[in-house]
Amino acid sequence: MTQPEQTRPRAVVCLSGGMDSCVCAALAARDFDVYALHFSYGQRTEARELRSAEEIARLTGVRELLPLKMDLFRKIGGSALTDESIAVPTGGDEASIGHEIPVTYVPFRNAHFLSAAVSWAEVLGAKTVFIGAVEQDSSGYPDCRPAYYEAFNKLIQMGTKEGDIRIVTPLIELRKSQIVRLGVELGAPFHVSWSCYSGETVACGVCESCLLRLRAFREAGATDPIPYAIA
């Protein structure tokens, strides 16, 4: 007698196309059927990030990738990622990264991303939402702190039909080098991920995101497989 196929629980993953979300998707795929959300919100490398998200989704076995466009961030400005009048900082001192909130912070962005992810999770019957937020070795964004996600989970309990969906942040307490090592262990497709704030063909190697990524691979003793103009 044929046994019915065992179904795995569903999870929603916020998939930016960057290094951290790449590892997060690979991690979630071990235990869940993954449904990924990608957000195009007017960021400078919007098209490149979408291509990376599509490739990561394909290579990690994501069941469905849902790309969403959010125009409000470009319209309200206030961030170097979405406002052409604000330059992306380059060539900074690695040691100073994270000591103050940089101009690349997009105002309250993650709340919008999480709201969309929780909405889709409700429809899918998924109880878990993954996001690759990182507090250690990060740019110091206020929406990447553990307390932020604890508060958001309380909001979900109060504001959803069943109240049992939970946001998980498996990377939040890891150093970037640890995330690289975990990704290597999981076979995460770093070669299709993209972290640069300004380059779309070759990563600039001098923006804050590139500096953090390059340092992470260096400290992990691994080779970063993407091309850089300066490394």
Image: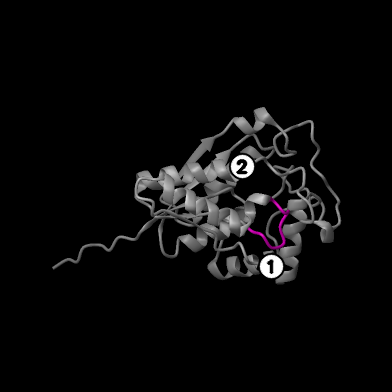
Q: Is 66 above or below relative to 58?
A: above
Disc 2 marks which residue?
Answer: 109
What is the span of residues highlighted in magenta in the rendered image?
A: 134-141
Magenta includes 166?
no
Which amino acid type is marked by label 1? Ser
* Comes first in the chain, label 2 or label 1: 2
| SS class, disc 1 | helix
Dot 2 crowding, Cα within 10 Å, few <14, some 14–19, many 20+: few
- For the point 74% across and 42% down, the residue is 198
- For the point 79% across and 31% down, the residue is 85
Q: Is 92 above or below relative to 73?
A: below
Q: Is 120 above or below relative to 83?
A: below
Q: Is residue 126 at all visible to an observer of this figure?
A: yes
Give residue 81's quadrant in the image.
top right
- For the point 54% across and 43% down, the residue is 113
Please give left or right for residue 207 compared with residue 38 in the image.
right
The x and y percentages for residue 29 are: 45, 60
Q: Which mark is residue 56?
A: none
The x and y percentages for residue 7 are: 30, 60
| SS class, disc 2 | helix
Disc 1 marks which residue?
Answer: 177
Which amino acid type is marked by label 2? Arg
The x and y percentages for residue 12 are: 45, 51
Q: Closer to the camera: disc 2 or disc 1?
A: 2
